[in-house]
Image (cartoon, grey):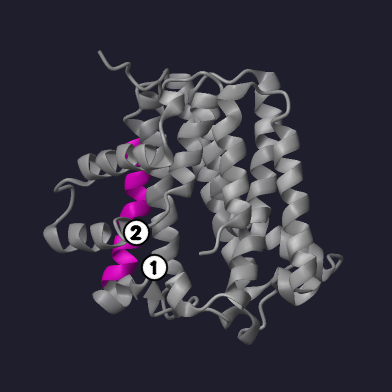
Amino acid sequence: MEAETQPNQLTDAELIERVDDALRLFLDRRFVSSLNDAIEYSVFSGGKRVRPVLCLRSCLAVGGDLEKALPAAVAIELIHTFSLVHDDLPGMDDDDLRRGRPTLHKHTNEAMAILAGDAMLTYAFQVLASSQVESDTLVKLIGWLSAFTNTMIIGQVYDTMGGYSEEMDPIEQLRETHSSKTGALLHASIVMGAYVGGATDDQHTPLAQYADAIGLMFQAVDDLLDVTQSTEKMGKATGKDAGQGKLTYPGLLGIDGTRAEIDKLLSRALEALSGFDAKADPLREMAQRLATRQH
């Protein structure tokens, strides 16, 4: 008889399948058909599911129950997708392409994109509220998801309209933007997954440090790919940030300096996990893959 695969031995593809199945279950006929179609167009557009996988991996790293973390993983992915739909709008980054196909406002229209984003934002909390966890844990999770979502929105404000403190130099402004806009939901994924998994106080701090490092690293890689890869390979427009005068790692540090920063952040992420056993190996491997991704 074939031995059953242990949760911590599941591949990323298998975890993504679990997340996608849960997304389909939660989204099944929840809204009027036109709105449901718009949401599903965005949610099932070929995303890498980095955030929900991190949530599940973090839960497993502390010995938690994978199934209990699925609502949190789904909620985070809905928030992430909402942010992309709104980020692509004409009033924001005005992008026509996302993951190799038309952005939602191009596929439908601007009004539907706004409404679909709104629906995903609010429905995420409804999904999270279905979690089979203790009530005090649920209150903590909802508070965290709200706080990290607001931090992400603040990062978008910085990225789109500025408003930094006058005392901050450009590299500090860049890190503040990216730790908010990109890092917040990555941080939420790890912290929320660990909390559902029953992480101890001693485990929360290093996991938060890991989250901080990969949040900055993820965006540094994104900035690097924006100037080194083609639109076809990335599935979205490249080279726009510099043209819009946005702060980027290559713009401030150059390509070699950005690669050195990525290496430093990867080392910091791996060091944060030094006190964890083999159950955290998938988190270590994920950090290394995120540091070397090509799209």
- The kind of residue on which mark 1 rests is Arg
**Could you tell me which residue is drawn at 44 percent across and 42 percent down?**
52
**Residue denoted by label 1:** 99
Residue 46 badge: 2
- Quarter of the picture containing the N terminus is top left
Count residues near mark 1 (Cα–Cα under 10 Å), then give few for <14, some for 14-19, many for 20+.
some
Q: CA distance from mark 1 to mark 2?
A: 7 Å
Q: Residue at x 59, y 65 (%)?
A: 222
Q: In what element is the residue under mark 2? A: loop
Q: Find numbered disc 1 in the image and state the secondary structure of the residue it sits on.
A: loop
Identify the main secondary structure in magenta: helix
x, y percent for residue 5:
36, 22
Where is residue 37? Give x, y as percent: 19, 61
Label 2 Cα crowd, 10 Å radius (few <14 / some 14-19 / many 20+): few
Magenta region, residue range:
112-128
Q: Which mark is residue 229?
A: none
> 71 and 55: which one is in front?
55
Q: Position of residue 88 (x, y in %)?
A: 43, 73
Q: Position of residue 243 (x, y in %)?
A: 62, 86
Magenta highlight on residue 126 = yes
> In which quarter of the view is residue 278 placed?
top right
Extreme bottom residue here?
243
Occupied quadrant, residue 208: top right
**Relative side of 86 to 186, left or right:** left
Q: Write the residue at 45% across / 80% down.
A: 94
